[in-house]
Amino acid sequence: MRIVIGQGSCGIAAGAEKVRKALLNTNINAESISITGCIGMCYLEPIVDIYDDDNKLTRLVKVSENDAESIARFIESGDKAAVEKLIVSDEDSEFLSKQTRIALRNCGIINPDEIEAYINAGGYTALKKAICELTPEGVIDIIKTSGLAGRGGAGFPTWFKWNAARQSEGEEKYLICNADEGDPGAFMDRAVIESDPHNLIEGMLIGAYAIGAKHAVVYVRAEYPLAIKRLKNAIAQAKDKGIIGENIFGSDFSCDFTIKAGAGAFVCGEETALIESLEGHRGMPRLKPPFPAQSGFWRKPSNINNVETFANVGWIINNGGEAFAAMGTENSKGTKVFAVTGKVKRSGLVEIPMGKTLRDVIFDIGGGMKTDKEFKAVQMGGPSGGCIPADLIDTVIDYKALGATGAIMGSGGMVVMDDRIGTKRMLEMLERITKGEGKEGDIELLEELCYSIKDGALCGLGQTAPNPVLTTIKYFRDEYEAHINDKKCPAGECSDLIEYRIIADKCKGCTLCARNCPVNAISGTVKKPHVINTDKCIKCGKCYTSCKFGAIVKE
């Protein structure tokens, strides 16, 4: 009997460590309790997987520390009634069964803290095959056959970058992993490092062998402390096994590993800005050419790919480039990992073959809208991407098709939006009120909308956006009421609600106001009181500011 507790960042945040400690306080054999990373079902965390002696799985979801005794009774008796309310539903099980997992193949399955778990799952066999059976050019040929494109967003052919670095002159070369995952809603790279760090190491070592690099560097966001901790542990274990270091697998190939924790600047996702940061400079993009393959880290030939790209490499070497290329579309081969977040019922990590549609991911795997409201749009590609509307829900997921919508694949963040009204609706209501088109009940509706935005926004900026409106309603409600009920702006700032009038007793008939009016809305003769035609007046205020006798008032 094995009890495996999901302890990726999502699981820990949901209380998985409390669950683990509670289980250790039961009569369950402590040696049978272990951890794993994120399996991708983030919406169901904490998750506890129980394997019987025949390796049959019982998956428990949304587990709390209070369920520990019930789990212990189930393990002791085998009676599922004790944990019936925790067993994952058939519907939720489809979240995984409808995916094709390559980059995520070990995530949520093996213990990320134990190299033996990775080796038992077939780990490092691809590295041994590459070093002992293939030439560097042979490795590059397999990657070329696979059609693997960079998963960091640009979709550039991986083999081409590797080959360019391979052919660059110089003994000192660097292979760099870009784990500076900055797109809002994206957490694919973090999950891979937390859940399967040896897979990243193996892919990078194969890449280093292919380009002739003796130095491998992982540039990872400092905001990923668990990922950094597990990667450091994995590197140390691999060094102890002789998998990192000198003469790997008894060959002439040697490679060391270092980690650089970046400060989280979004621009460092760009490869040359990342290199500048690695060198201790401000993260600013360099002029290209020269490209990193010719002059990169410390002006030496360098290759940069992201975590997901490297996570595919070991599988491709073991299974062949043709097997990877058999999945996907003509323009986009293999699978792609997406972090699905927002107003979707099943949020988490999804890996599907290219060629599936947005509908497949959002509705078939993701379960559709969380509140059963209408799907409105999905944002892809982060700040550099775009929003794809509901009428394009059947868009095929590949680089070309997504690009045709005006969005981009990006690194894989997929933020799903329903038809919930938000800050745009708030702005529209305020504009109506300032134009004198407000109606009874608008203040209450505006307050309700503000609180809905605060509760439902995905980030702190969205959650605080309604604050100016809520505070002005609280302290200046009478002015809102004046705009709505009296169609007047007490501050005299809303042009649609103000009117300029000339006080006849004060007007000297100097004609200055008439001469400054851009629409000839003021009439009168010299030294006689003038009059403003309110139908023609555009309320620009030029008459008001030009009058030297205080004869014009704003009401």
Image: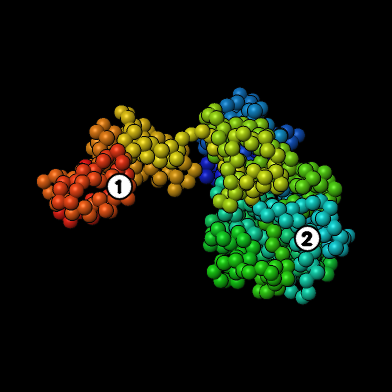
- Residue 271 in sight in this render: yes
Which quadrant holds residue 269? bottom right
How many callouts does the rendering have? 2
- Along the line of sight, the residue nearer the viewer: 407 or 127: 407
Identify the amino acid type marked 1: Asn
Name, please, the residue furthest toward the top. Answer: 81
- Residue 75 in sight in this render: no
Left or right, 187 with reference to 245: left
Sequence-first tag of 1 and 2: 2
**Residue 320 marker:** none
Identify the amino acid type marked 2: Phe
Residue 306 placement (x, y as % from top left): 67, 56
Query: Mark 1 = which residue?
Result: 520
- Tell me the residue at 61%/31% (across/down): 367
Q: Quadrant of the C terminus?
A: top left
Left or right, 82 with reference to 519: right
Query: Mark 2 = which residue?
Result: 160
- Label 1 or label 2, whichever lies nearer to me, is 1
